[in-house]
Amino acid sequence: MKTFFLLLLFPTAIFSQTKPPDTLHWKENKPLLWTDFKGKPKAGMSGEAFCMIEAKYEKPNPLKKIKFKISAVWDKGKSWIAPISKTDDEFLYYQVLFNIYEVHARRLRKEFSEAKFGMDPVKTFREKYNPADASLPDECRDFRDETNEGGETEELKKWDEKVKKELKELEQFHE
């Protein structure tokens, strides 16, 4: 059994959530490596991933434009894989999961780039952020269920292609 944890870090103006110290930010040219699974394995499970979307913005003063930063983040210290489970399909499962987080980060970047923040940036930020908070767990659950936690190789490959296509479609919103 695999599990993954969803964490969306919600920011406020000029505020940054503290993230774990040993993390990896999603990068196109830096896929996951087995060494990115540093957590301690748990009995009876094949692996566990801890991903998050870090979102923050700042508006130094009313005359300045809002700056926002959104990142898909992998927590190396909490993510782990049982040695017996280190297979190509298992690795792909976790890479696709991390890619799903990046798709959602890009969607948020797109939403924020098109938003008019006005005088109440907190309200606008939440209006854009909250639907992402609701949709990401649903997509991750669908991914987990449709691939049978990565056990259905053909479904896993379909998801991989689907997510890669979405990344390409949202390429202009790459960080």
Image (cartoon, grey):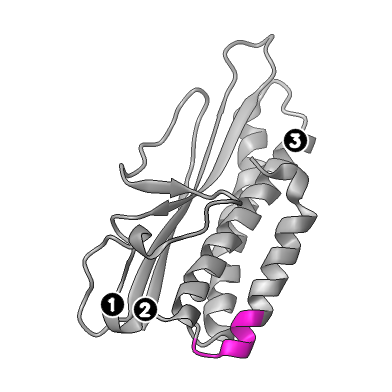
The answer to whether mark 1 and mark 2 are in CB contact below 8 A is: yes
Mark 2–mark 3 Cα distance, whole angstroms, equals 39 Å
Please name whichever residue, 34 or 134, is drawn nearer the observer in this view of the structure.
34
Frontmost of labels 1 and 2 is: 2
**Residue at 52 percent of width and 74 percent of height:** 92
The answer to whether mark 1 and mark 3 are in CB contact below 8 A is: no
Secondary structure under badge 3? helix
Identify the residue under disc 3.
Answer: 113
- Nearest to N terminus: mark 1 or mark 3: 1
Identify the residue under disc 2.
Answer: 86
Expressed as whole percent of the image width and height from the top left, the position of residue 50 reads 39, 60
Q: Amino acid at mark 1?
A: Ala
Mark 1–mark 2 Cα distance, whole angstroms, equals 7 Å
Q: Is residue 147 magenta?
A: no
Q: Residue 2, located in which quarter of the rendered image?
A: bottom left
Q: Amino acid at mark 2?
A: Lys
Mark 1–mark 3 Cα distance, whole angstroms, equals 41 Å
Identify the residue under disc 1.
Answer: 82
- Residue 121 circle label: none
Q: Is residue 153 magenta?
A: yes
Secondary structure under badge 2? loop
**Residue at 61 percent of width and 45 percent of height:** 129
Pointer 1 local density, CA inside 10 Å: few below 14, some 14–19, many at least 20: some
**Residue at 32 percent of width and 81 percent of height:** 46
Q: Which residues are magenta?
A: 151-157
Please name whichever residue, 16 or 81, is drawn nearer the observer in this view of the structure.
81
